[in-house]
Amino acid sequence: KAGVTQTPRYLIKTRGQQVTLSCSPISGHRSVSWYQQTPGQGLQFLFEYFSETQRNKGNFPGRFSGRQFSNSRSEMNVSTLELGDSALYLCASRHEQGAPLHFGNGTRLTVT
Amino acid sequence: AQKITQTQPGMFVQEKEAVTLDCTYDTSDPSYGLFWYKQPSSGEMIFLIYQGSYDQQNATEGRYSLNFQKARKSANLVISASQLGDSAMYFCAMRDSGNTGKLIFGQGTTLQVKP
């Protein structure tokens, strides 16, 4: 079974631009969660989607948004990029409630 | 509020020896789950082991075991027979109440295995 796939692996953007990150969950997993990892703040939860509905949201500004498609694939969008948005963005999927999260390799975003 | 604390920023262990990575947690929810993940330099987070708050026995997965002491609110990871490939960052995490996909992570411990 293929794991969680995130694209692209690396991105370089300029302040003020917007970016879209993509995540394909493990086949059969309907829950997708997104996390931001930075050296200063560590791993922080962004949001979770289940069956195309946002089920939970972390404490991030509205510039961070996401969506999930009917095939469970998910996208995350960050608008009006700031330098502080530079981070590793990790996507995770899980099969059912209580099951462990399975993470992808992440997308490393650099904002200049 | 729920919190995970990992007090060891970095640790060294000799190859083939056992090592314990500390994790303490704080929650008022009687039902919770505790996870350990490994993050190599490549960036991916690899699930290692899970312990539910109502599990009677400590979880084990191959060379990984979890020393769960509920009264002390600790969930230490024990790696037996360390291998060079175990060198990585290790994160302890707690599932938020409500059984969602939200995990609260500790700051992590960097483990280096010496040959």
Image (tube, coloured by chain):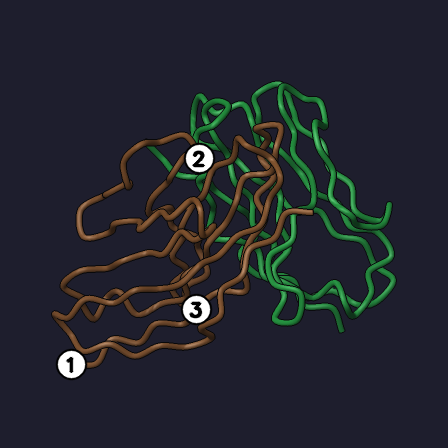
Chain colours: A green, B brown
Q: Which residue is mark 2?
A: B53
Q: Are marks 3 and 1 in contact (CB under 8 Å)?
A: no
Which one is earlier in the sequence, the residue at label 3 or at label 1? 3
Which chain is home to disc 2? B
Q: Nearer the viewer, residue A102 or B79?
A: B79
Q: Is residue B97 left or right of residue B57?
A: right
Image height check: is A71 above or below B93? above
Closest to the observer, A7 or A78: A78
Amino acid under label 3? Thr
Name the residue that disc number 3 marks. B109
Q: Residues within 10 Å of mark 2 (few under 14, many from 20)?
A: some
In the rendered view, would you say B40 is above or below B28?
below
The residues tagged by marks 2 and 3 sit, at their Cα atoms, a distance apart of: 23 Å
Chain of the residue on which disc 3 is drawn? B
Q: Secondary structure at mark 3?
A: strand
Of the residues under marks 1 and 2, which one precedes in the sequence? 2
Callout 2: helix, strand or loop? loop
Query: Residue B32: image x %, image y %?
Result: 51, 35
Q: Amino acid at mark 1?
A: Pro
Q: Residue at x 57, y 55 (%)?
A: A107
Q: Chain of mark 1?
A: B
Q: Which mark is residue A71?
A: none
Secondary structure under the numbered disc 1 in the rendered image: loop
**Which residue type carries mark 2?**
Ser
* Residue, disc 1: B115
Q: Residues within 10 Å of mark 1 (few under 14, many from 20)?
A: few
